[in-house]
Image: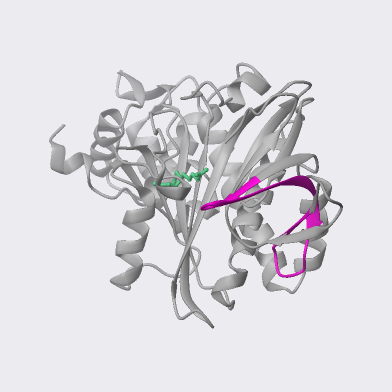
Amino acid sequence: MAQTKMKRAILYNENIKSILEILSENPEGISGQAISEKLKVSRSAISKIVKNLEKLGYKFEVSKKKYKLIEKPDVPFPWEIGEEGKNVIFFKEVDSTQEKAKELAIKGKISHGTWVIAEKQKSGRGRMGRIWESPQGNFYGSVFLKPDLPLKETVKISLIGGLAVLRTVKSYEITKSIKIKWPNDIFVISENSAKKLAGVLAESFGESEKIDFTICGIGVNINNSPLDIAICLKELVGEKHNLLTDFTKRFISIFKQTYEEFLKGKWLELKTEIEINMWRGKVKVMQGEKEFTGTCVGINPDGSMVIQKQDGGYENIFYGDTIIVTSQEKSE
Ligand code: BTN
């Protein structure tokens, strides 16, 4: 397929969704005529949609004028992720969903709650200028939000993103311990290791007293663990059909629900849930030249982290990089 085509946004399409539903309900196949009558769409339009879907990786068997769906690719196209797919702009490949969402936000082309999701990123970004390895098979998405917050408190958005990932991961009934690491990571903790499953990058724009908008970017390792210190969902749940699509569907809806709780003024309840599920052991915090080691004891109402230092005193942490300290130092 031509490079320009690959870069095109793929949007929710009701006809595509309905055709795929009809085909799934008729595993033995169904005629183009019958689909056309059900949807009141011409047979040539159906044939065109099927051809386009084949280009996107769907497999069909077409015999005796019957269409039979053989296989769906594990790609979270907007029509595969339910109602919330209407708020998704999907790309096969982008430099970074974060940059793409920011570009669309500045041009006024997206509204609150719109997601930019990509199958892979060429220049995925993490916090502190790090690279976020983004091979095909994992989740990469950035959502455009308009929170009514001063810049200092936008750490809450990062924590809410992390909580939504945690809630989604827990919906798979995983036995391993999953923890939020302040302010932006999800880790899988075992006796002597801490492995990173997901990261959140919340970037805000506007005045420091009242921001204009936030782009909350989230990367979750689903089928690949690109680094040694990483782990992926597949390693936790085992083989599951089309895991990336399944995760995306659950996550987009859980994120929306979690963010709505925040908008309804339930921050303190969310904060408590985050505290229950956060890494509360030893941490090293790095703020440029400054470094603290201590025990994470909780989160303040403004979203900052409280650590108890080795000398017994407490320190509120508003920014910086946190490293989990287990028996050895293992995580970024
Ligand atoms: C971190 O742990 O440092 C945050 C990682 C955030 C990665 C996501 S993937 C989707 C979005 N696009 C990017 O380029 N980065 C974020």
State the residue lying farthest toward the front.
Answer: 311
**In the displayed structure image, the side of residue 273 where residue 134 appears, left or right:** left
Viewer-proximal residue among 71 and 142: 142
**Going by the picture, which residue comes out furthest to the right?**
312
> Is residue 263 covered in magenta?
no
Q: Quadrant of residue 122?
A: top left
Please, is residue 265 above or below residue 313 in the view?
Answer: below
Residue 25 in view of the camera: no
Residue 50 % position (x, y):
30, 33
In this rendered view, identify the residue nearer to me: 87 or 202.
Answer: 202
> Which of 23 and 319 lies nearest the eye of the viewer?
319
Q: Main secondary structure of the magenta part?
A: strand
x then y, percent, for residue 218 = 51, 47
Q: Residue at x 37, y 42 (%)?
A: 124
Which quadrant: the N terminus?
top left
Q: Is residue 98 visible?
A: yes
Residue 91 appears in which quarter of the rendering?
Answer: top left
Residue 222 rendering spot, x and y as whole percentages:
54, 29
In percent of the image, x 46 and y 81: which residue is there? 207
Q: Position of residue 89 (x, y in %)?
A: 37, 53
Q: Is residue 141 above or below residue 246?
A: below
**Figure quadrant of the C terminus:** top right
Please give the name of the residue rendered at 75% of the width and 60% of the height, measured from the top-left corner: 315
Q: Which contiguous range is marked in magenta?
A: 285-307
Q: Residue at x 52, y 44 (%)?
A: 81
Q: Does the magenta-highlighted stretch encompass residue 298?
A: yes
Side of 41 relative to 164 (left or right): left
Number of callouts in the render?
A: 0
Taking 314 as reference, is 128 left or right?
A: left
Seen in the picture, residue 157 relative to 95 is either above or below; the reply is: below
